[in-house]
Image (cartoon, grey):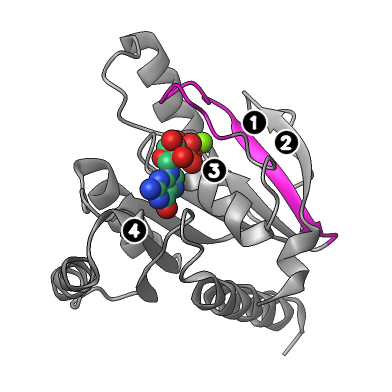
Amino acid sequence: MNPVYHQAKFINSSPHLNDTPPDQGLEVAFAGRSNAGKSSAINTLTRQNALARISKTPGRTQMLNFFEINERQRFVDLPGYGYAKVPLAVKKKWHELMETYLTGRKSLCAIVLVMDVRHPLTEFDWQMIEWCEHTGLPLHILLTKADKLNYGAAKNTLLQVQKELKDSRFPLTIQLFSSLKKTGIDEVHAALDQLFNLARQDQSEMSTPS
Ligand SMILES: Nc1nc2c(ncn2[C@@H]2O[C@H](COP(=O)(O)OP(=O)(O)O)[C@@H](O)[C@H]2O)c(=O)[nH]1
Ligand SMILES: [Mg+2]
């Protein structure tokens, strides 16, 4: 358990990138398909039931939601992808928003990719993985809703996904998680600590003249 993450506070929801919090410090973004369980994961990790609004209507949260852990660290709940009923114009706007955010955000230091353990590695997931591979951005994958499968089947999916990604040439970790059963929390906290620490070292190396 890491109580640091329990202090998270909502900062704002931003439908555009011109009203985001200042691009300083370090940000970990939670990405994944609509309904994968991103907002639930943020609530579980921060132990706050209604921090990231859990949408009953998939795809409705088309905004970037920012949460402050402390003055140097943030979480971002990225808008979900892949809801068929969303009109094309909305999908286009989503692509633009994501691309601008992912390419332009200097404080972005890692991605947590949330996948439903029953439907891992969708086309969207591969796009995110390839993006991280391309930019070297560290990635931590949550196979969530692990409670929906029995232990053996969930473990099997974990091994399968690890096998599919074993050749990736960037920092990548994968785990099972359940917001419902509150399993895997310590492992995510440890992964987040490591991601933030790595990024902090990188930042201080860059700011130290040699
Ligand atoms: N059984 C189970 N259901 C979950 C879990 N996480 C999320 N859900 C449910 O999945 C739905 C979508 O979750 P949400 O967090 O809003 O997904 P998001 O669209 O990715 O933010 C909601 O009905 C949640 O209650 C989990 O670990 N186990
Ligand atoms: Mg959500």
Residue 142, percent from left and from top: 39, 62
The secondary structure type at the circle numbered 3 is helix
* Neighbours of disc 3 within 10 Å: few (<14), some (14-19), many (20+): many
**Pointer 3 or 4: first along the chain:** 3
Per the rendering, the mark at residue 20 is 2
Label whose residue precedes the other's in the sequence (4 or 2)? 2
Q: Is residue 37 visible?
A: no
* Residue located 14% across and 69% down the image: 164
User: Residue at 21% of width from left, 53% of height from top?
Assistant: 121
Looking at the rendered structure, the kind of residue marked 3 is: Ser
Image quarter hosting the C terminus: bottom right
Q: Quadrant of the N terminus?
A: bottom right
Q: CA distance from mark 3 to mark 4?
A: 17 Å
Question: x and y percent of residue 197 in the render?
Answer: 65, 80
Q: Residue furthest bottom?
A: 210
Q: Are marks 2 and 1 in contact (CB under 8 Å)?
A: yes
Q: Amino acid at mark 2?
A: Thr
